[in-house]
Each structure stands twice: as C-alpha cells, then as structure tokens.
Image: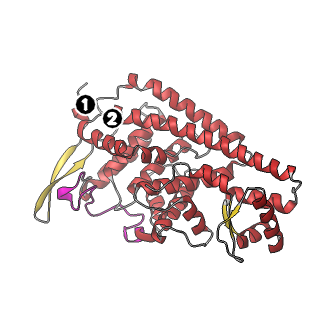
Amino acid sequence: MDKSGRVGRRQVMKAGGETYFAYIPNSLPPDPPLEMSSLYSLLDNANAALGRLDGMSMILPDHSLFLYMYIRKEAVLSSQIEGTQSSLSDLLLFENEDAPGAPLDDVAEVSNYVSAMSYGLERIKELPISLRLIREIHERLMSKGRGQTKQPGEFRTSQNWIGGSRPGNAKFVPPPPDQLLQCLDSLEKFFYDEKVNLPILIRAALIHVQFETIHPFLDGNGRLGRLLITFMLCQEGLLKEPLLYLSLYFKTHRQTYYDLLQTVRETGDWESWIEFFLLGVIQTSDQATHTAKNVLHLFDEDLRKIEVARKSTVGILTIHKYLRSNPICNTTKIKEACGVSLPTVLRSLGVLEELGIVKEITGKERHKVFVYTKYLDILNNGIEPV
C-alpha cells in the first residue's frame, strides 16, 4: 500500500532570518485506511491483558490504596521521560513536607502531574474528553514550578519545536500558531466521530500521536498526551479503574517511541506505531497485574507476621493500614491520621521495625521518618531516574 497520502504537509516559515518547515498533519483517521489484518492478533491480546488487569482491580481488598500509590508511580515515570530526576521517595517525602533529595522544581512537577491526573479522572465522569477539558488538565499540570511561566491552560500563540535550539535546526516543528486551532478542532471531532468504526485502543493510539504532533502547548505536551491514553480507556469503559499507564514502557523503549512518532509523520506508517503501542498495552497490563498480586501477597504476609508475633493491637493494625497508602511517613502525620498518641505511634512503629516491616531513615531522636520498605521496593521497580 502506498502510504504517502497519509503524510501531512510542510509549510514554509521564516524566523530570525532563516527558513524552516512546520508540519501540519492530515486529519484522522488515516487515509488510505489502516491495514487492520496485521493488527487483529495483537489487538485481541491487548484486550485480554486489559481484561485481566481490570479483573485484578476488582479483587483488591482496597483498590483505592493501590491506586493511590500506582498513580504516583506513573507521575514519576512520565515526568522522568521529560528529564526530571525525581524519584518516588522524593515525591512521597515532598507530600509529607519532608525535604526531598531531588531539586524542588523536579518534585513540584511530579506533584503537579498527580494533581492533574486525579482532577482529570474525576472530570471525565461528568465532562467528555474535549479541548476544554484538556486545557483544564493542562492548567493543573503546569500550576507550580517551572511550568508557571508556560501559559498554563492556554494553547500556544507562538511557534514551538522539538530538538535543536531553534526551529531552523529542530528535529521536528509542529503546526504554526495560525494553523493550531484548525488542527485541534479536527482532532476533537475525531474523538466522537461515529462514522469511524475503529476499536478504542486503536483510536487511543492514533489520538496520542496526533496530539504529540500538534503539540498545542508551550510545555507539558508529552505528559498530557500520555494521560489522554488512560483517560480514554476509562471513559470508554475498557478499564473500571485507571491502572494502565504506558510511561514505563515508553521510558524503557524511549528512542523507539520517538522514532516511531517521527516515522508516522514522515512516511504515514501508522501500522508500525500501533503494533508498538499494542505491545506496550500488553506488557504494561501484565506488569500492573503482577505488581498488584505482589502487593497483595506482601500485605497478607506482613499481617501474618504481626499475628504470629501476637502483636495484633488496634494501634499496630491501624498504622500498618495507613502505611499501605503512605509508605514513607513521619511520626507526626501518622499520629494525626490514625488518631493515636505519639507514644503509641512510636511503640507500634518499633514493633513493625523489629518485624522487618518498616525502617526508620533519619537516625534522629525526633521527627522520625519511617519507610514501608518492601512495599516501596515493589513500586520502585523501573522508576530509577534516567
């Protein structure tokens, strides 16, 4: 099949005394239509993997606790792709108002991501994915730190570019500002075009690339583009809980990810991108299912340790439950959240430390910080800064 008809047009632009080319993508869906025959097997496997993940979320005794931490893991990974050096421990210390080890701006960006994700997941329950909602989420994403100066919640009115120091030597230049709203309007129409009979996963794959290609904001496009994938799957009912995040897969295969985005623009080869995307859905779903099982096993194992040691007091069990959603926490926060006295907190944490469940990390006599070590180890898999 000749796919050249899918390639957008390049518009000649001038700035700073030099000429460059801005890329304006064709509207979705691709034309000529996708060769679906090569994709059906992967699509079936991806849907099956999503089904297993969705089923797993239903048997978690308290899926909100797992989700709370899993969203934070995704926030760290997605921000790392953009170059931040924040870790999950940094984010949790930041949220507990203890000094993180990473630069404050890095941790603030990750915290913004958590806020934007949580906000978007609530909003799609009442407002379909739209340009309006995308702007609202972007405002949350860029509300603190370096993003404050990058027009939070506003589509750009100037030219941006990817790679290089200026449009003239950039690897890729998105549509110019005067074409931006037309491109976005076309994308929004595709969200709900009933004449387009494509599976949700395929539509999500197409929309992700189109959004990245349009690059409608001065900053935060990559993070928001990855969020849109999960928002779509939740809105369309493929997932009951937002447990699929592709950032670890994109981080692991970072160069392939960028190369395939550019290949779509240069050759119109959407099929290779979609294959890569579906493989990511399969691998990420299986990893998330495996992580959920490991977390469940750990919680059960640690509760048995407490019971065998005959330490099943109300205070210890309450604090252990609290640590499931706050695996790094100081004694003051534990005291306030669990409604127990400081001596009870210290005594209970001492027991949990003796049992090898938690570890104190400051070495201080006061304002101690405890880590639910094995739980954090499970969540930290793949989160080492790039």
Residue 238 visible in image: no
Left or right, 48 with respect to 61, comes to left
Tell me where residue 130 appears, x and y as whole percent: 45, 51
Residue 106 belongs to magenta span = no
Left or right, 167 with respect to 104, comes to left
Looking at the rendered structure, the secondary structure element under dot 1 is loop
Q: Which residue is at the far left?
A: 17
Residue 150 belongs to magenta span = yes
Q: Residue at x 82, y 68 (%)?
A: 347
Magenta stretch prevailing secondary structure: loop
Q: Amino acid at mark 1?
A: Lys
Tell me where residue 250 appears, x and y as whole percent: 43, 45
Q: Which mark is residue 270?
A: 2
Residue where numbered disc 1 is placed: 3
For the record, the magenta segment spans 147-172
Left or right, 356 with respect to 141, comes to right
Name the foreground residue: 36 vs 246: 246
**Vertical order, 74 against 275 (above or below):** below
Colour scheme of the picture: secondary structure
Tell me where residue 174 appears, x and y as whole percent: 27, 52
Looking at the rendered structure, the secondary structure element under dot 2 is helix
Quadrant in which the N terminus appears = top left
Badge 1: how crowded within 10 Å, few (<14), some, or many (20+)? some
Quadrant in which the C terminus appears = bottom left
Which quadrant of the figure has residue 333? bottom right
Labelled pair 2, 1 in contact (Cβ < 8 Å): yes
Name the foreground residue: 13 vs 92: 92
